[in-house]
Structure formats: C-alpha cells, structure tokens
Image (spheres, rainbow, N blue to C red):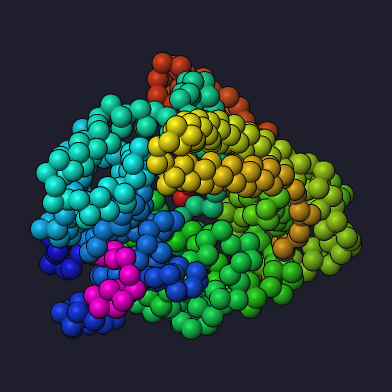
Amino acid sequence: MRDAAGSLRKLIIFTEHRDTLNYLHQRIAGLLGKPEAIVTIHGGTHRDERKRVQATFWNDREVVVLIATDAAGEGVNLQCANLMVNYDLPWNPNRLEQRFGRIHRIGQTEVCRLWNLVAKETREGDVYHRLLEKISNESKALQGRVFDILGEVFEETSLKQLLLDAIRYGDQPEVRARLYQKVEIALDSEHLRNILDRNALAQESMSAERLFAVKEEMEKAEARRLQPFFIRSFFMKAFEQLGGSIYPREAGRFEITYVPTSIRERDRQITGRNRRDTTPVLKRYERVCFTKDAVRPERLGLPVASMIHPGHPLMLAVTDIVMEQHVNLMRQGTVLVDPGDEDVTPHLLFLLTHEIKSGDGQTLSKRIQFVRVAPDGAATFAGWAPHLDLEPVAEADRARLKGVLDAAWIHADLEQKALTLAASTLVPEHYNEVATRRIAHVDKTLTAVHERLTKEIDYWSDRWMKLREDQQAGKDVRLNLENARRTVTDLEGRLENRRRELQAMRHVASATPVALGGALVVPIGLLRQLRGETPEEANSFSSDPVARSRIERIAMEAVRQAEEGRGCVVVDVSAQKCGWDLTSYPPPSAASTSMPARASRSSTGSRSRPDGSSML
C-alpha cells in the first residue's frame, strides 16, 4: 500500500450499492483519520462533479482512496492508481471488465493489482471463485487481453443464470459439476481467441511509405508548434502575477500548491467554449510539467505530472484572463527590431488566427499565422514563428523612429491586406490539410464500425433464429430468446447512432480569419542608418546583401554535403518558410528521422533554437 518513498499508494474500491459505499467511506475515513483523503463517485454524482473528483484523485496527493459504484466503471481514466478492490462482485462479467479497465489501460506504468472479495463458503461464491481462478490462468496465457472480452464469454448461458442455479441447486453434486463445466467451456483458450479475432477492429497494416509520410507530417506539426520553452516562460510569469504559487521539484517538474479563486472561476465561465478537455481547474496540482518526457518520471514512486499545454484547462483560464487584461495592447500594437535583417525597409507584421470545426461543433484545429505587409501593400506569409527573432526597441532609439511611425503608409488599412491574403491562401491550405486528414479518418472509422457491428448483428440475429426454432420445438428458452432480441435491437441502435455521429464529424467548416494584433518591424539596418553608424561601426557579419546571401548559401551547402554524406536526401524548403531551410530525409533502409537545418543571418557562428533545430 506504500510506494518507495513511504507514501500511501492510490486505491480504488468498487461496490455495487450506494449504502455499501457510504459504509466503506465511514470505516476507511475512521481508519485513515482524514475524511478528505477519500472521494466517491456514484450514480447520483453530477457529470461536472464526477470530472472534478476524477481530476482531484489524479492531481491531489492528499487524496488516496476512490470509492465508487459502477457509475465510475466506464469512460473514466484512472491510470494514476494501480490498486483495485472489488468489494462485492457484479453478476455481469462485462462490468468486471469495465472496472479493471479504469486502471489497466494505455499509459499505466505500474503492475496492476486487483483483489476480488468472494464469500467462498456460499454456493454462488464457490462458482465465482472457480470463475476467477480460470480468468487468472487465461489472462496469463493471453497477456491480459481476457479482460477485454469478459462480457462476451458467456454466450450460451449468462453468468447471472449460472449463479442463480448455484443458489437454487448448488447442494447437488451433479449440478455443481455441470456449472463448473460451463465455466471451463466459457473460458476455454480457443473460445477466447475466437472472440478476440472477431472483435478486432482492423486487420490491415501500414506500409513503410505511409508510415514515413505520417511521421513527416508529425515532424512538420512539431516544428510549427509553440515550443515548451515559451509555454513555460509565459505560464510561470502570468500564473505568479495572478497570485498562483508554483515551486520547482524534480528536473522539469513543478508543484502547484495554490490556484487562485479568480483562475478557477474563469475556468467555470469558459467551460464549453472551444474546450475539448472539460476537466475543471483544481485548487492544487501535485505535479505539472511542460514537456512529454517529464510526465512520467524515470524514478518509480513519483506521481504522474499533468502536462501544461495550450489546451490544458489551467492554461486556458490563465490565458483568457491575460488576454482580457491586455487585449487593448494587442490591438494597439508595438514596435520591434529584427536584429538579423540588414535591409532598410520596415514592414508590418500581423498576427492572425482562424479555426477549423467539425459538424458536431468540435474545434479540430486552431492555428496562429503571421502575415507580412510591405509599405507598398504587398502581403506575404511571414513564416511560422518570425516573432521569436524580434527584439524590443531600446529606449535610446525610440526618438529616432518618429519619422518612421509618422509615415503615411502605416496609417493605411493594411490589416485588410493581411486578412485578404489569409482568406485566399493560408485558410484554404489549413482547411485542406485538416479536412483531408479528418475525412479519411472518419471514412475509415465508419467502414470499420459498420463491418464490426454488422458482423455482431448477424451473429446475434442468427442466434435469435436458432433459439426461436428451439422454442417452437418445445424447449424453454424464453430468457435467452429475449436477451438475444434485445442485443440485436441495441446493436442496430448503436450502429445507427454511430453512423449519424460519424457523418456529422465528417462535415468540416472553416471560420473567418481574425486579426489579433500587429507590430511595426524595423530592420536593424534601418536603425543603424538612423543612428548614423557605418558598416564598420555596426560590426555585423555582413551588411552587404550580396555577401550575406553568399554566406547563407555556403552554410546551406555545407549542411547539404554533410547530410548527403550520410546517405540522406536533402530538399531545399527555404521558400516554404517552415522555420528552416533544408529538410533531410533518411535513406529508405534507415529509420525515419528528419533533421531540419537552417542558415541564419546571425552575427554568431552557430546557435540552437528552443525548438531543437540546428541553425548554422
């Protein structure tokens, strides 16, 4: 019950009835001496409260016990615990599967322990004990997959009927032997493998070419994504300014001991507004992090961290408050200096955003993009993160820029130029990228769902017809016949509902781009000119654009030769403004890796960006 550090491990207890839940809560609270260390979920728990309890159990180290009825048996992720007790057992094995699936799922790093409490000295307990022994043996043979199909193993006679027979006739040796035999047949290895094969969603595999294409798209998305360094810098400063308390713990991991009421209240206000994650913001978090590799620590016994990212509820609430406080500054704009541009022509940089939504209202993709507008009104895509290389204007240089700020072209309606470019090129590209991927995924899912549920419907329809023939022959099959009919009806309803859901998801719509803010970007070349500096005084690596271009080409060629020497295929993507100039593809026989490289107009020989790309 305790980890390597001596702390209590988190434990989940399932029970059938709410009265039993209240009894266990009272007894365990008296044992621990801390009622606040126990949380509960039952059928009367509201959906929002259920999400709050789940998040608290995940993130609050003081909460160590969750007591629940089967209201928490499905659709709840509880991998933060690896210990479970079934205080009393359901007569439907499918619910056993659902309960254990709360902890035995993707993301679990510990060995899961499950204890089933059975009154063995009773007739039905004796049968259940034999069932659990058989499940344990077959689970080892099938590497745990038996828990995925427990609800389907008793196709001839339900487990409930077996237990009722045990209660009524369990004192008769021949009846007990027959019940044991039915358990053995239901959990036969070959029978279980047939059910697993029947339930397989897809049997196809991904080709090497398709796998490489998917990996390439993932790497491009990773390069465009706002990097953890900037997310952490923004969150730490904003959270502390809003009154929050956050302290460093292990490397790359932090503990939030207090989330201000204003942030939690803002979370309640924005819940449901473009929120995929409806988990509420908590008062404290045992561990948070900003990188994927810090979520699960290498050292056992440490808690799993909640990763703060742009879509995390806490991040959304903090960002919403900051945006509300500073929205006028965003619209007012600012003046920035490009230290790597030796040109003398300033330009405007607009920050735009737009969304792609599905037919069910879910936001599929929200992207921030930058558009550069020159003094002559020409608008071009500025790249994915041009702002990262820009710097504030020094106080001593502000007066020198008065003439630039008073220029007539700045006061023209250039924002519309940026929006027009976005609507004509950037938005369609974004839409096509998301829609193609979304429609292909939905169509594949629809085909797989239709195939699987149709196969199930055919199976149970055939079984219903056979049972009906048995009934006409004089056999007593009323219960099984009714169960088969209900199963067919339920499956047909599920198929129709799922088809409607997927058709709604297949519809993709694009919103209108919106300008969030803008900035006047002054090249360092113009600023030096206004200062009256000579090229020698500027001490730049090259103020001559021809020489600078030549140096960049030499740097790119050096990277190209180095990569081609490793057998890679190098492609020049500088015109695409990806954030790097060269993409290196490995040879077909090698592992799929990509090394973005970029020639930089920096005064230093080489440096690394926070996104990990190499700049030479």
Examine the structure image and report whether residue 187 is included in the region drawn in magenta: no
* Residue nearest the viewer, comparing 565 with 318: 318
Q: Is residue 523 above or below residue 274?
A: above
Q: What segment carries the magenta color?
A: 10-24
Spot occupied by residue 492 in the image (x, y as percentages of width and height):
59, 42
The residue shown at (51%, 78%) is: 263
Q: Write down the quadrant of residue 236 in the picture.
A: bottom left
Spot occupied by residue 423 in the image (x, y as percentages of width and height):
81, 48
Spot occupied by residue 413 in the image (x, y as percentages of width and height):
88, 60
Q: Is residue 217 above or below residue 336?
A: above
Q: Is residue 406 left or right of residue 8?
A: right
Examine the structure image and report whether residue 13 is included in the region drawn in magenta: yes
The residue shown at (61%, 72%) is: 270
The answer to whether any part of residue 59 appears in the image is no
Q: Is residue 520 left or right of residue 161?
A: right
* Residue nearest the viewer, comparing 252 with 480: 480
Q: Is residue 408 above or below residue 245?
A: above
Tell how many labels. 0
Residue placed furthest toward the front = 474
Q: Write down the quadrant of residue 88 in the picture.
A: bottom left
The residue shown at (14%, 64%) is: 2
Spot occupied by residue 194 in the image (x, y as percentages of width and height):
35, 27
The residue shown at (69%, 73%) is: 327
**Quadrant in which the N terminus appears:** bottom left
* Residue nearest the viewer, comparing 130 with 41: 130
